[in-house]
Image (tube, rainbow, N blue to C red):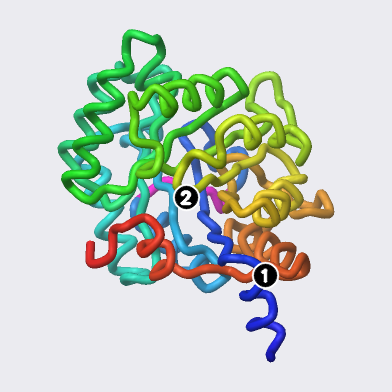
Amino acid sequence: MSDNERRGALYAPTFIAVAPNGGRRSKADHPALPLTAGECAAVARAAQSAGAAMIHLHVRDREGRHSLDAGLYREAIAAVRDAAGPRMVVQITTESIGRYAPDEQVAVVKAVKPEAVSMALREIAPAESDAKRLSDLLAFCEAERIAPQIIAYDRTDADRLARWAHARVIDARQVSVLFVGGRYDPPTPARPADFVPMIESCADIYRDFMVCAFGPREAGCGVLAGLLGGHVRCGFENNLALPDGSPAADNAAVVAAQARALTAAGLTIGDAIALRSLWGIEGR
């Protein structure tokens, strides 16, 4: 039995998603941070070669501001498809970053109909009374074969997700959850231990989970997720450094470092084909 076969017998594949830009940082933060559709496409191609199965896309307007414009998303998706072909799952986001109301977040999903979308629980359904909005959007995603991922920023979000799942407000087995560690403001780097309470709260009731971590311990947080059966999102949206704290040259370097850390821990890296199978979006 080869080393890869032996690892595969112990663990299911771990998927890496690259988050190359986010909605806040600019080239002043790092000159290799992509802003245009073409730059995001180049990152997708390089990150796929480094081990990423998915790209988490944010798009920017002409002034470089975060946008939920459907046309900009279509342009970016097409550019990524041209650059990486079917070897990269393309996920858009509804994250508002203080600019968009919940109904506008829903509208972009219905307009673009991407193969995958992430949505922040506290933005798209900030109150208990907003459960139906989330439930209706998830039903739309199921009908259109869109893979939804719900973002939980802390234990409060995770606990509400678990409560809504147990109450069958949402069908948990059709949803991926992204747990976030650390934050932009005040600058707070994540630690692997930060994720344990959230993962224990509700990871086992959802189809799968992923983590993303602020700061240079990003790779260690990803290894923890992989060993617990989850997946990892990494890149310049949350972290500009390599595991040793030195500046990363680009997003592909961050992905490559994460892939090395995962394989060193005995884990295997999954590709886009396997991720689409897990998420039920083959043939999109």
Q: Which residue is mark 2?
A: 34
> Percent x, y for residue 118?
39, 39
- Check disc 2 and report its element: helix, strand or loop: loop
> Percent x, y for residue 15?
53, 60
7 sits left or right of 272 in the view: right
Q: Is residue 58 visible?
A: no
**Hey, which quadrant is residue 169 in on the image?**
top left
Q: Is residue 222 above or below residue 201?
A: below
Q: Which residue is mark 1?
A: 10
Q: Residue shown at 37%/70% (left/top)?
A: 84
Q: How many marks?
A: 2
**Hey, which quadrant is residue 96 in on the image?**
top left
Q: In what quadrant of the picture does the N terminus appear?
A: bottom right
191 sits left or right of 42 in the view: right
> Percent x, y for residue 82?
28, 68
Q: Residue shown at 36%/18% (left/top)?
A: 125
Q: In what quadrant of the picture does the C terminus appear?
A: bottom left
Neighbourhood count class around disc 2 (C-alpha, 10 Å): few under 14, some 14–19, many 20 upward: many
Q: Is residue 75 visible?
A: yes
Neighbourhood count class around disc 1 (C-alpha, 10 Å): few under 14, some 14–19, many 20 upward: few
Q: Residue shown at 44%/43% (left/top)?
A: 176
93 sits left or right of 75 in the view: right
The amino acid type of the residue labelled 1 equals Leu
Q: Is residue 66 above or below residue 92?
A: above
> Percent x, y for residue 151?
48, 33
Q: Is residue 100 magenta?
A: no
Q: Residue shown at 65%/57% (left/top)?
A: 254
Residue nearest the viewer, comparing 248 with 211? 211
141 sits left or right of 174 in the view: left
In three-dimensional space, the C-alpha distance between marks 1 and 2, rounded to whole angstroms, equals 37 Å
Q: Residue furthest right?
A: 244
- Magenta residues, start to end: 31-36
